[in-house]
Image (spheres, rainbow, N blue to C red):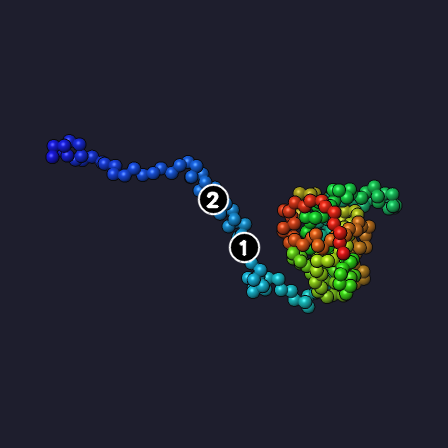
Amino acid sequence: MGMYNTRVKGRQLLLENPARESRAKKEREAKHAAKRQEKERKNLGVIGKKEAREKGVWKFDESQAKFHLFLPLHKLWMGYMSELLGLSQKPTHAITRESAAKRMPSASGMHPKLLKADFHGSILTIFQSKNPCIVGLSGIVIHETENVFKVVTKDNKLKILPKQNSIFTFSVPLYSTLSPSHNINTPLPLPLPALSDPVGPVQTVEDVPNIQFELYGNQFMFRAAERAGRKFKHKETIEL
């Protein structure tokens, strides 16, 4: 009893020795938590293909497949290309073949940018395909998926152009379609919407001095968002 009164009574006794978490474990858990938060942030608002189909995200009213309705999108794309490729302004003097050749950007600088560029609004044409029935189809791209381009043609029809086993052609302007006062740090000017059928011919990239490229569909079977962050390696290819 005397031992209890002198050594135990009124004192706090540690009955267990709790294991302390190591600093490395805490850092590891913090890193995992940060990764989870980043993944949740990236997936915020993203829905799967099945859910998108059920909600009608990619449904298109074919009665709205009017070529003139998408001309403002095409003009916006030409301005986007002008800024992306750093195209120079159109000269005030008469354009000759020699002067046009001097103004043309280098191919080595354009190709990496075009690989990752957004093609919504561009005019794509099937130049070659294993299916001869679709050769020559052309239109403004309104939706790109991993396997197809959806376009609206000049005769106001919605067409689906498969990437596999197809070679496309498209053009970009030789000279910038933006005003000389445009600043790269300012948003691109939005063209006026086409409210009714235009009167007379409407200018597209095909009606101005342009640079034509070929696009190999088998090497382009990625979603637009995936291409933007993908690293492409130069390699020879044999198509069709």
Write down the quadrant of residue 147 in the picture.
bottom right
* Residue drawn at 54 percent across, 55 percent down: 45
Mark before the other along the chain sequence, 1 or 2? 2
Furthest residue to the left? 1
* Residue drawn at 56 percent across, 62 percent down: 50
> Residue 77: image x %, image y %?
71, 52
Helix, strand or loop at disc 1? loop
> Residue 212: image x %, image y %?
79, 51
The quadrant of the rendering that contains the N terminus is: top left
The three-letter amino acid code for the residue at tag 1 is Gly
Q: What number is the disc on residue 175?
A: none
User: In this view of the protein, can residue 137 be seen by the observer?
Assistant: no
> Residue 121: image x %, image y %?
71, 55
Residue situated in front as seen by the camera: 201 or 171:
171
Write down the quadrant of residue 207 in the picture.
bottom right
Helix, strand or loop at disc 2? helix
At label 1, counting other C-alpha atoms closer than 10 Å, the crowd grade (few under 14, some 14-19, many 20 or more) is few
Q: What number is the disc on residue 32?
A: 2
* Residue drawn at 53 percent across, 52 percent down: 43
The three-letter amino acid code for the residue at tag 2 is His
User: What is the distance, in whole Å, between disc 1 and disc 2 at their CAs?
Assistant: 22 Å
Residue position for label 1? 45
Furthest residue to the top? 6
